[in-house]
Amino acid sequence: QRRSLWLRTAADETLVGRTTRYVLPEGLDVGGLAEQLACELAPGSGNFDYVIAEAVDLCLRRALASGSDAVVAEVLASAEPGLEGISILSHRAEAIAACIHGAACVGDDGLLGRLLDGLVAIARSPKLASAHELARAVERGLVALRRFGGLEPARALLEALAGVHAQTSTDRIRLLTTVASGFMQLGEERTADGLLDQLCDEVLAGGFDYVARAQAGLAVAGALRHWPNIARVERFRRFLGGLEVFRDTFTAGRFFETHRILILEGIVDSLADSKTRHSDRVQGFLDHEEHALRRRIVSDWGELCGR
């Protein structure tokens, strides 16, 4: 039971705590999922973008739970043509992340490549309102790719996102910390260190406005929870040495030090956190074990069937 809990994809929690307005018809057989999803994605359905994203997510969850690659492939074939019809990019990113999970499961490399390109295109689009949902979609996609042994596609996605020019400083901060954490969890520690150090340099050099600078500092502190303790201490010493750059705006002629207090709290919380790093290592081991076990089952099944 504990192993099953560890192996739960982070994607399983994306709908937890929020009301989902889309509900699958009662008694719907798994064989009818593809047709049902095609109806929801049809141009004349009148569904809002968030409803379509939830429909893609729920149909793929049900298909994956069936254990049938054929059912998953059918649902993916119904979902892919309708993804471009989701005009709000944050909802499109959510739907793409769900499809990445399915494509990684059935080993459809062609579809996987197109979906990853879709995420990169969203990151580069000037119409992206916020990178929050995009970052969450990237994290979910990386979990699925690691689970199914897709390390090269995961690495390619992170490399592409690292070169994206975000529209706002907040989006750039979120993307860089997400990409750096992703590289760290793939074992690419040198690349992850380089990206995080780049962000630290920009923060301490005063490259952001006051609010974005504090957001970047807190984002770095949060990302460093995935790093070993020694690496955290080295970077936080730099932050403490340059603490004067974290300034609030002037209001009524007074200077408030709220940002410095928040940065110090973030540093303390990050240094005290041992759970995140431990969780990453256990999750990485179990992802590798799960992939190896899946390959062995497929191999044994192929030998049994004479293929």
Image (cartoon, helix red, strand yellow):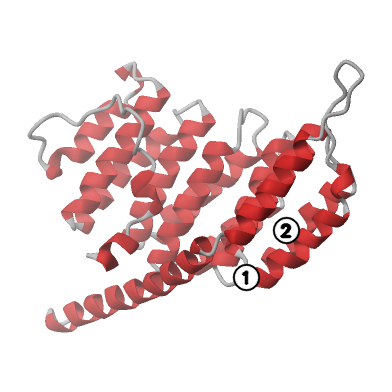
Residue bearing mark 2: 196
The structure residue drawn at horizontal position 66% and vertical position 48%, both measured from the top left corner, is 266
* Image: 236 above or below 202: below
Left or right of 282 on screen, residue 127: right
Left or right of 48 on screen, residue 180: right
Q: Amino acid at mark 2?
A: Leu
Classify mark 2: residues with Cα within 10 Å, few (<14), some (14-19) or many (20+): many
Residue lying at the far left of the rendered structure? 27
The structure residue drawn at horizontal position 68% and vertical position 30%, both measured from the top left corner, is 126
Secondary structure at badge 2 equals helix
- Numbered tag placed on residue 228 in the rendering: 1
Q: CA distance from mark 2 to mark 1?
A: 14 Å
Q: Is residue 164 visible?
A: no
Coordinates of residue 101 in the picture (x, y in percent): 37, 53
Q: Quadrant of the C terminus?
A: bottom left
Taking depth in this image into account, of 214 and 254 the one nearest to the observer is 254
Coordinates of residue 47 in the picture (x, y in percent): 34, 20
The structure residue drawn at horizontal position 51% and vertical position 61%, both measured from the top left corner, is 276
Q: Amino acid at mark 1?
A: Pro
* Image: 233 above or below 305: above
Classify mark 1: residues with Cα within 10 Å, few (<14), some (14-19) or many (20+): few
Image quadrant where residue 1 sits: bottom left
Left or right of 96 on screen, residue 219: right
Coordinates of residue 50 in the picture (x, y in percent): 40, 26
The structure residue drawn at horizontal position 23% and vertical position 58%, both measured from the top left corner, is 69
Secondary structure at badge 1 equals loop
Q: Earlier in the sequence, mark 2 or mark 1?
A: 2
Taking depth in this image into account, of 134 and 245 the one nearest to the observer is 245
Image quadrant where residue 305 sits: bottom left
